[in-house]
């Protein structure tokens, strides 16, 4: 079993040692200790941090991640609660993705409008341009 110092572990997972210590304070990760009481991490810890970073990447708040970790520590009896927490985050993330698609659509139309302005093929305002496009949909 490979043992990583906090610096080596930070490099492996792409986080700072400061962040790892913060995660430790929040009990999101619990490093093991060697005979000299120095913390060390394992490949399993790399996988665990990877999963936590996926949760964070969905927009899951630190409070939600902390709750998930507490539920996980409670064992299999907490699986229904963990599942519901993940489903709630999933629904929120999907909603945010749909909202982002709308924003990106407007951004794309603005870029197209600028192209038209630069080529002198569009003389209308952006608002009128959008109205015209919407009337065609």
Image (tube, grey):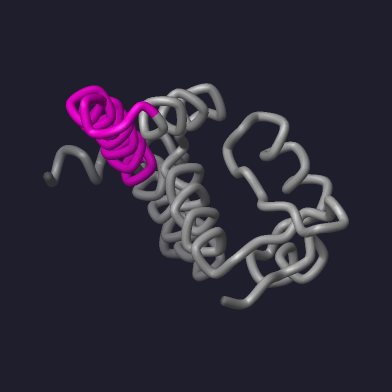
The part of the image, by quadrant, that contains residue 14 is bottom right
24 shown above or below 47: above
Split into 4 quadrants, where in the image is the C terminus? top left
Residue 99 location (% of width, % of height): 34, 35
Residue at 54% x, 69% y is: 43
Tell me the magenta residue range.
Answer: 74-102
**Could you say which is closer to the camera, residue 74 or residue 89?**
74
Residue 24 location (% of width, % of height): 69, 39
The part of the image, by quadrant, that contains residue 128 is top left
7 shown above or below 113: below
Residue at 74% x, 53% y is: 33
Residue 4 location (% of width, % of height): 71, 69
Residue at 47% x, 62% y is: 47
8 shown above or below 102: below
In the image, is residue 123 part of the stretch drawn in magenta?
A: no
In the image, is residue 82 part of the stretch drawn in magenta?
A: yes
**Could you say which is closer to the camera, residue 87 or residue 44?**
44
What secondary structure prevails in the magenta region? helix
Q: Residue furthest left?
A: 137
**Could you say which is closer to the camera, residue 86 or residue 24?**
24
Residue 98 location (% of width, % of height): 28, 40
The part of the image, by quadrant, that contains residue 55 is top left
Residue at 66% x, 50% y is: 31
Left or right of 105? Residue 36 is: right
Split into 4 quadrants, where in the image is the N terminus? bottom right
């Amino acid at each position: 079993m490979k043992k990583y110092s906090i610096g080596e572990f930070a490099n492996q997972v792409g986080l700072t040692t400061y962040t790892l210590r913060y995660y430790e304070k929040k009990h999101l990760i619990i490093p093991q200790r060697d005979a000299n009481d120095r913390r060390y991490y394992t490949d399993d810890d790399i996988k665990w941090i990877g999963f936590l970073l996926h949760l964070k990447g969905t927009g899951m708040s630190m409070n939600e991640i902390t709750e998930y970790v507490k539920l996980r520590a409670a064992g299999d009896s907490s699986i229904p609660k963990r599942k519901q927490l993940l489903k709630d985050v999933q629904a929120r993330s999907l909603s945010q993705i749909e909202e982002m698609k709308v924003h990106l659509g407007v951004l794309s139309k603005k870029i197209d409008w600028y192209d038209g302005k630069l080529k002198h093929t569009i003389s209308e305002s952006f608002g009128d341009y959008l109205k015209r496009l919407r009337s065609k949909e």
